[in-house]
Amino acid sequence: MLLPWSHCWDSSLTLMAKETVPKIRIENVSYFYGDKQALQDVSLEIPAKAVTVLFGPAGGGKTTLLRLINRLNDLVDNTRMTGHIWLDGQDLYDPQVDLPTLRRRVGMVFALPLPLPGTVRENVTYGPELAGVHDRAEQDEIVIRSLKQAALWDEVKTRLDEPAGDLSGGQQQRLCIARSLALEPDVLLLDEPTSGLDPISTAKVEATLQELKEEYTIVIVPHSIQQAARIADCAAFFLMGEMIEYRPGEQIFVNPREKQTEDYITGRFG
Amino acid sequence: MNRYQVQKFGFVLLGVVALIVVVPILIVIGAIAVRGIAAIDWEFLTAMPRDGMRAGGIFPAIVGTLWLTLGTALAAIPIGVGGAIYLAEYARDTWLTRAIRLAIINLAGVPSVVYGLFGLGLFVLFLQFGTSIVAGSLTLAIMTLPIIISTTEEALRSVPTEFRTVSASLGGTRWQGIRHIVLPQAMPGIITGVILGLLRAAGETAPILFTVAAFFLPRLPQSPLDQTMALPYHLYVISTQVPGMPKEIQYGTALVLLALVLSLNIVATVIRSYYRRRREW
C-alpha cells in the first residue's frame, strides 16, 4: 500500500541535504475531462532543484498532471478538478492567482517543438516582451543568457535573425527550452521534449536538463523508460490515472516495490 | 484497367472539370472585353453622362461605387472581424453562440433584394438617413457580414491551437496570443474573406436599389448623406430602362465594373502573398 504522502526523498537520497521543503505539493488531485476521469486522487511532493520524472503507459494522466501545474488545462473546456496544488506554499487554484504571472514562474516545453512564427530572437523575446521588457539591450542579454542555458547559443549565435522554422528539430526543441528560460521561471515542465528528436539531439537536451537542475525544479514526462532511468532524481509511475509508486529514481528502476511498476519496467505490458 | 490507368483517368477527369469551371468565366470576360473596349476612353471614365446617358461618361457611377465600397468596408470589417474573433476565440459552445452561428448561416442565404428592403425600412426610413451613401453602405455591410464572419472564423480556426497554448505558457493573456500570434497567421485568410465580401457588395444591385442609387444624377455625391449613381445599378438602368442605348456603352460599363472588381481581387492577392511570405514556419 502507498502512503498517503509519498516523499521521493523519504529514503537515503542526497536530496535531503539540498532542500527539505517541497517545491510543489500535489494533494489529492482528481481530474475529469467531461465524464472521463484522467487522474485519481494523486498526491506527491516534488523537490526543488531536481529532476522529477512522471512515467508510465499512454493515457496514464502524466501530461494532464503536468499541465495542471501551470494551469494550462484551464484552456480546455468542460473539465473539472478536485484537490490542491501548492507551489512554494501558494495554492495555485486560488481565484486570486494571476495566470500570466504563474505561467512565467512555471515554464512549459511541449512534445513537439513549435517555434512561434518569426525569428530565433523573436521566439526568445516573446515572453519577456509580453511581460513588459521592451529595452533592446536588456532583451539582448536575455537572448544570450537563455540560449546559452539551453546549450544552443554556439549553434545559433550567427542566425538570430533567421526564421526559427529553419533550425533543425533538435535546435528547435532547445529553442523552445530557451524560450521558457527567458522568463527566468522557478519550475520547468517538459512533456516528452525529446519524442521527435534523434539520439544526438536527445543527448544534448538531456545534458541541458542536468545543468538546468542546478537552478531549476524540473518535472518531465520522458519519452522512454530508458530516458526516465537516465535522468530521474525522483520518479513517479502512473497507470490509468493512478499514481502507483513514487520513489527515488535510482531505486524505482532497479528495485520497484509494486508489481505493476515492475511489469512496466521489465516490459511485460504497456 | 489497372490502378495506374485508373489514376490517369482520374487526373484527366479532374482536369476536364477544372476546365469546365474556367472556360465560361473566360468567355464572359472575353466577350465583354471585346465589345466594351471600344467605348472606353478618357472621356468615358471621367465625364458626366449626357443625352439621357446615351453619351458622355460614367464618372459619377464609378465614384459612387468606390464610395459605397469604402463605406461598406468601414462598417463591415470591424464588426465582422471582431465578431469572428469573439466566436472563434472567446465564445463557449452555448445555445446563444449556436443561435448566433445559425443566424449567420441563414443571413448568408437571404436574397439580396430582401436586404434592400430591410435597409429601406431601417436606415432610410426609421433612422432617417434618407436615400444616401450611409444607408446604402450599411445595407451592403449587413449583407457582407456573413461572408466576412464565416471566412474570418475559418481562418482563425485554421491556426493550430498549439500556438495559443504556447503563447499562454509564456505568460501571454488570451488577447496577447490572438494579437501577436493568431491574427498575423490568419491574416491572409481574413483578407481574402473581407475582399470577397466587399467584391460582392461592390457588384450588388438590389440592396442599393432603394437605399442609395440614383437613376440619373449627373454630378458627384456631395456628402455621405447624398444619393449617388453606382455602377451595377447604372448598368441595370442602361440595359433595361433606356431605349436606344448604344450597345458599346452598355458593354463598356460592364467592362469597367468587371475591371474594378478584378483589380480589387489583385490587390487582395498581393496583400495575401505579402503576408504569406512573412509567415515563416
Image (tube, grey):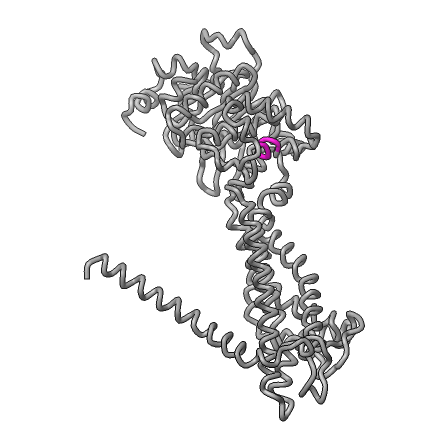
Where is A269 relative to A233, above or below? Answer: below
Residue A84: in sight, yes or no? no
Identify the residue at image location x=65%, y=79%: B233
Q: Is residue B120 above or below residue A37?
A: below
The residue nearer to you, when weighing A174 against A225, is A174
Q: Which residue in the rendered view is the most extreme toward the left?
A: B1
Q: Is residue B220 left or right of residue A101?
A: right
Residues A41 and B149: in front is B149
Q: Position of residue A1 (x, y in %)?
A: 40, 19
Residue A152 image point, x, y percent: 51, 24
Q: Which residues are magenta?
A: A121-125
Residue closest to the eye, B238 or A209: B238
Q: Is residue B27 magenta?
A: no
Outermost residue, bottom side: B244
Would you say residue B68 is visible in this rendering? yes
Marker count (numbered): 0
Name the spot of residue B5 as percent of width and height, x first: 23, 60
Q: Which residue does the image show at 62% across and 65% down from the upper left?
A: B198
Quadrant in which residue A214 is drawn: top right
Queried whether the magenta region covers residue A123, the answer comes back as yes
Q: Residue at x 42, y 70 (%)?
A: B21
Q: Quadrant of residue B10?
A: bottom left
The N terminus of chain B, quarter of image: bottom left
Question: With respect to residue B223, does A132 lie above or below?
Answer: above
